[in-house]
Amino acid sequence: MTIFSAFAQKNIAPLATITATGTGAAGCQTGACSTLNDLNFGTCGTQQVWISTAGPPSTTVGADYIQWDFPSPKRFNKLVIHHAQTTARFLNGALIQYWNGSAWVSHSSFSNLPLNCSNTVSFNAISASRFRITKFETSTVGQTSNPNFREIEIIEAPGGYNNAGVQAITPATFCAGTQSLSARIENAGRNKIDSVRINWSVDGVLQSTKYYTTAVDTAGSKSGNEASISLGSLSFSSGVFKTIKVWTSFPNGKKDTMPANDTIVMKLAPALGGNYTIDPSGTGTSNFTSFTAAATALTNQGVCSAVSFTVAAKSFNESITLGNINGASLTNTITFTGAGKAATRLYSSNTNVVSLNSASYIAFKNMTIEQTSNVTTRYCVNLNSCTFITLENCAILSPFTTSVNYNLYANNCSNNIYKNNIIKGGYYAAYNYQYSTTYAYGGDLWEGNRISQSYYYGLYTYGGLDNAYLRNTIDSAGYYNIYSYYEGSAYYDGNILPGNSGPGQTPYYLILMYYPNYFGGSGYFEFYNNMLGSENTVAYYGHYLYTSGYNNIKYKHNTIHKGNSTGYNLYFYATNTTNNVELMNNNFTRTSAGSLLYYYQPNNTHKVDGNNFYPASGSALIYYNLKTFSSLADYRAEANKLGNALNTTSVMPTYKSATDLHIDQTKPAPNVKYAGVNKDVDGDDRCKLFVTAGADESQYGKTAISKAGFSGPDTVFVGSPTNYFNIASVTDPNNYAYYVNGTFVKDSIHLNLIASNTGSISIKLVTESCAGKDSLTRTIQVVNPTAKPNTRFLADKSNIMQGEIVRFTDISRNGASSWKWDVSPDSTYDGATKIARYKYLYGTSSSTQNPVIQFIVPGKYKVCLTAANNLGSNTLCRTDYITVQTAISIAANLQTITDASAYIFDNGGKDGDYTNSFKGSLLIAPCAEEIYLVFKKFDLECGYDYLRVFDGSDNKGKPLHCTSNILGVNGPGFTGGSLVCASSSTTCMPAATDTFVAKSGKMFIEMTTDTKSPLPGFEAYYWSKPKAQPKPTASFTTMSDSVCINKPLSFTNTSTGDDIKYFWDLDNDLTTFESTTKNAIWPYYATGT
């Protein structure tokens, strides 16, 4: 009885190494070629791989292809093509070729495939170890270029009966010496093989035949259809090849029905291992005279251990191409080491100088690699589908060119290291394409490189997961210094991008980052300790970061500085659909106009705190939560609503220079709270108690233990607050803790002590700095008062502007324990409405020891303080102690001001920006002989927004402003400020030393602005010389000298004199004036006179 076994046809594509190229780009795109690996989709859907071709593809054989290389000959007769789509980019035809050992042979072709998601292409069986499809044809439906695939299967052809074959001779790589060889055979037939002969020869000399009598089952069986047979041992000398031929015969004692797969012939030599040299003048078996010779040996022989090539200090005009080297591994690395960047030079004008395809574990160190041609599509270093490649301490150079070429090019690579290189020139200085919707590529390290002098892109990176960019300097690198798309979980730390202009495009984006963590990522996208910009940069964006809807962003301790007056330091498009954002402890500084931060819309998962913004005010200073803020205070008020910006500061750090954003270590710097970043831009430790905002940690005041100390009396009174003042400055980076009788009471810099009982108490101050702790303890005596208080007080300022605040301090002696403040006048009238002239702020009141008062109405104020203790009280009054001057803003309607002196602002007020499309005026008309005007601040859009000043009561008076400068419809007049004028003839700014005099005793001011973005505007102050004239005579009449209760009485003013002001006291209290109009009316509700 004869037993037959069914032959199960299987997909053998996963056994092959797959490569590809296209006329548009080498390699497979989106995914690695290895993605075509038994996925068996069967339906249309997301593309896994596409080939970059023309549309339609080239008709030249070999211009576009996908190639399969098997380790041993295979027999197959079908392709199953799984298309990504049927409406475009559809491969419906190609030429099938196989390699006969020396050339490509055209076997057959197919065309006009139906527009199905999956198509089976059948052909006469091919027996080969290498084949390809080329000369692509695409459907005319939709896009005709770039055919895309989800999978391509290769179906093994059924064999005949009694069909044995040889798959491989093993090992393929080994070191010199005696080596045992084996042959791997297979049962490629339909029935089980119980015996077979294995014949072999060495350099044509027949060796003893091996008889194998163990059963080998058919393909698809549980036991498998392969077997390994030991041939024997041979001695191999380094660099010497032996031709090994192995063939099978008489399977089951019968003639082999399909002999095509019976035989394999291999030339074997010991693989490379150990140390070699590359020197054109060198000799010996361990020296290669060129890179090409070394590459050929690696390709043909592989490696059996780590291999090191020491390259001579010479120039090599050649190019090198390497693929997957047999035997290369994490331990069996291949390293080319030159004598230094200035000594060893590998250069060429060919398409590639160094080309690595599907290579791994290869390193180039300490040499110059240079592309000398500047024509389109040239590469200095070209890496395709590579892993674990290292480029270290090399100069990678290409000519500066406007043609699209690539200096360092990497496509679909992973786990590469680029370290301490000079990467200079090209249209792209460094190009790293790792796009995959599954983040299939990544793990690269870019560290310590200097990237410069490119035309358009410095570092271009597209896709990739878990790449790290550490301490690189990227400068004069074109329009984009860094261009990043779709990166997942990237880590940027310590990179410096000063933003200087170079020979290429003027920088516009120092960094552009779109869609970080777009496909999820494995963790946070982190951006720490980076320095962007300088005083000299012309870039519009320091950093443009678009994260709308994409999560997990940590942005901490970066310094972004701009000296130009346009654009943004950080444009961060984070929205309320973006979760888990941390924007903390960054320095955003400018020395001219512009926006420090654009932050679109946060949600409650965002942490925005500890950032230092300078300046604290300016046009469109910060955009946050769909609102524009021109002052840091207004931004903080809005951000506080979401629990953000609680520790925001505004300090201009002292940078080392205009181009070096490191902190001057001899000057104070903004310190903030620790945010989890332990090192700074230089790898220095951060002081966690007082961490410095920005990239560079300041050591100012942090290197020595701060001595604890405080001053104050040794004796205090019961119930009377006593201040103990720390000898340290508020800017010192220390923490403080006060203890009274061993109990912690306060952590502020100073201590306000109220003792409740007589006796002695101890006060202890603990001062903690980054260097350690120190403490001081004092014993204080507490006694009862012996006299009533000697009342005294002072104010931090006595001459102020309307709306400003004054801080009052009680300095009474003899132990006051209660206070009563009386400020008069306390109210005035707006018509018949009584309004307060001042208000207490920050929780203080008339009974607070040290109140804070905002004065709203101009005038002179009397201030009295009554201080008391258990023995009595004393009162001190100071008449006209506080003088409040008028502050007025120009309005659209003409206003007249008659004060002898006052402050004047644009229509944005003291701290705000003026508005666009504005026209307003103001008449200054005091009782004066002359008026004097000075400008304290001035910043109007040059040539478009103007301020005019006239000596007279309207704009027909004598101009005191520039009259010849005009650019738009709003001139002439005073104009200019932070923005550069379009023409020098339009500039006309009032200097701080200029005084403008109106000799008529009246001054008219008008302001006009255009439709563009406004600026901070101006602040002016005027005073006047009183007019010499007689005193007025006061008199009035009334309709009656009596009036009924609850009825009003009218008063008619009959006073005489010039420039009169009127003050009516209508209720006989002799303290407050009820009206300041010319005539008055007042109701009387009680009897009396």
Image (tube, grey):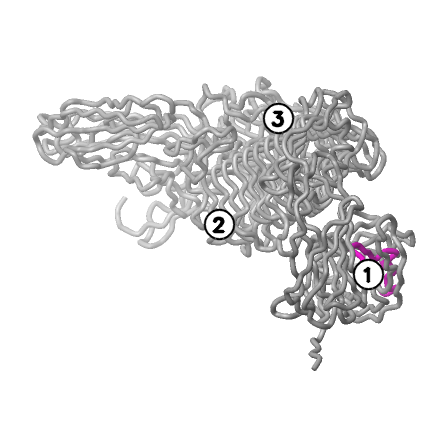
Residue type for callout 3: Glu
- Residue 947 versus residue 775: which sits nearer the camera? 775
Q: Was residue 392 drawn as part of the magenta stretch in this picture? A: no
| Residue 374 appears left or right of 30 | right
- Residue 808 versus residue 181: which sits nearer the camera? 181
Magenta residues (range): 128-144
Quadrant containing the N terminus in the rendered view: bottom right
Q: Is residue 575 above or below residue 914?
A: below
Q: Residue at x 79, y 54 (%)?
A: 130
Q: Which mark is residue 210?
A: none
Q: Is residue 496 above or below residue 358?
A: above
> Residue 544: x, y in percent?
63, 42
> Residue 144: x, y in percent?
85, 59
Distance, label 1 to label 2, CA atoms, is 68 Å
Q: Quadrant of residue 303?
A: top right
Distance, label 2 to label 3, CA atoms, is 31 Å
* Disc 3 crowd, CA 10 A, few/some/many (<14, 14-19, 20+): many
Which of the two labelled residues, at mark 1 and mark 3, occupies the earlier sequence position?
1
Residue 196 seen in render: yes
Q: Residue at x 62, y 56 (%)?
A: 438
Magenta: main secondary structure equals strand
Q: Residue at x 57, y 35 (%)?
A: 470
Secondary structure type for disc 1: helix
Badge 1 is on which residue? 260
Quadrant containing the C terminus in the rendered view: top left
Badge 3 is on which residue? 535
Badge 2 is on which residue? 606
Residue type for callout 1: Ala
